[in-house]
Image (cartoon, rainbow, N blue to C red):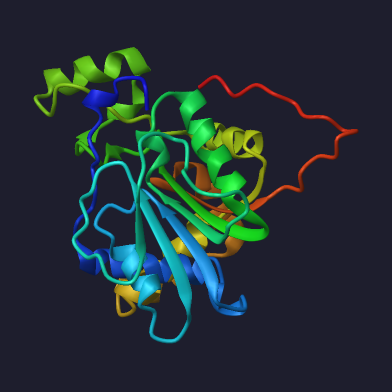
Amino acid sequence: MSESEGQRQPHAVLDLHSRRFKAQKIERLLDLDARPGPLRLLEVGTGSGGIAHYFGTHPSRRFRVSALDVVDNRQTVEGYEYVNGHDTQLPLPDASFDVVLSNHVIEHVGPPEEQLQHLQELRRVLRRDGIGYVAVPNRWMLVEPHYRLAFLSWWPRSWRTPYLRMMGRGKEYDCLPLSAPQARELLRGAGFTFEQQCGRALRITFELESPGSLLWRGLLRFVPDWAWALAAPIFPTLIYVVRPLPAPSPEQGTSGGGPAL
């Protein structure tokens, strides 16, 4: 987090009730019930601690949970081990987790090279047969969620802070949302295979939070998977289920270089 580190804000969601729904959505998206336990789970950017708490005190499954953040904003501390981070490097051993979670974290860690390092670190600590959840705000969302300002992330990067100041919403734009092509490039560069899960995530959200909604019951639950896939690039949040690519053999070598966003 070297670039503008002192200006970056945690932007943590501290509402524990919403974090429980988020954790249940992640649990379903990753099909964690199908994985034999106990599962070692890491949440990077724990914020309130609500997601880590849900898994660490799960009523029917056993999770051993570590939760990391660079700013301690926890509202609950039960059920998990807290790890204090300082940058994109994770002070954790290689291949030590079955599940890794990065929920609205990557846009806060810094410029593209640090975003790539964040994902590479997730890949490093994830076991070969592990699975992960990565969510990031879409650059092309209509209203930027951290500052509640329309079109903020549409502008070129050098224009975003002046626009934020002009609209009286803040002094420094400290986030870097990604477009769908940018997110895919970073995930590939970090050594992940991935599936975009925006449509399925929306279905699960309605099933958990608004099962009686007329919009859900009368329309959205009938939308086919192919239509969700077509609409994925314009979803406000890009959601990916990720798995590690096998490490290359010494004979194959490695390719370096990160994407320029």
Relative side of 260 to 172, left or right = right
Image x and y of residue 36, in percent: 62, 78
The structure residue drawn at horizontal position 35% and vertical position 36%, both measured from the top left corner, is 86
Does 228 appear above or below 189?
below
Point 12% across, 29% down: residue: 169
Q: Foreground residue, 245 or 253?
A: 253
* Above or below for 131 versus 167: below
Residue 161 location, x and y as percent?
Answer: 23, 18
Is residue 10 visible in the rendered image? The answer is yes
| Occupied quadrant, residue 97 | bottom right
Name the residue at 46% across, 44% down. 91
Percent of width and height locating residue 104: 37, 46
**Outermost residue, left direction?**
168
Quadrant where the image shows the N terminus: top left
Q: Quadrant of residue 257?
A: top right
Quadrant in the rendering for residue 248 = top right
Residue 116, relative to residue 75: is it above or below?
above
- Whether residue 173 can be seen here: no
Query: In this image, 141 relative to 174: left or right?
Result: right
Q: Residue at x 38, y 56 (%)?
A: 67
- Report the number of discs: 0
Residue 175: image x %, image y %? 32, 30
**Identity of the residue furthest to the right in this view:** 251
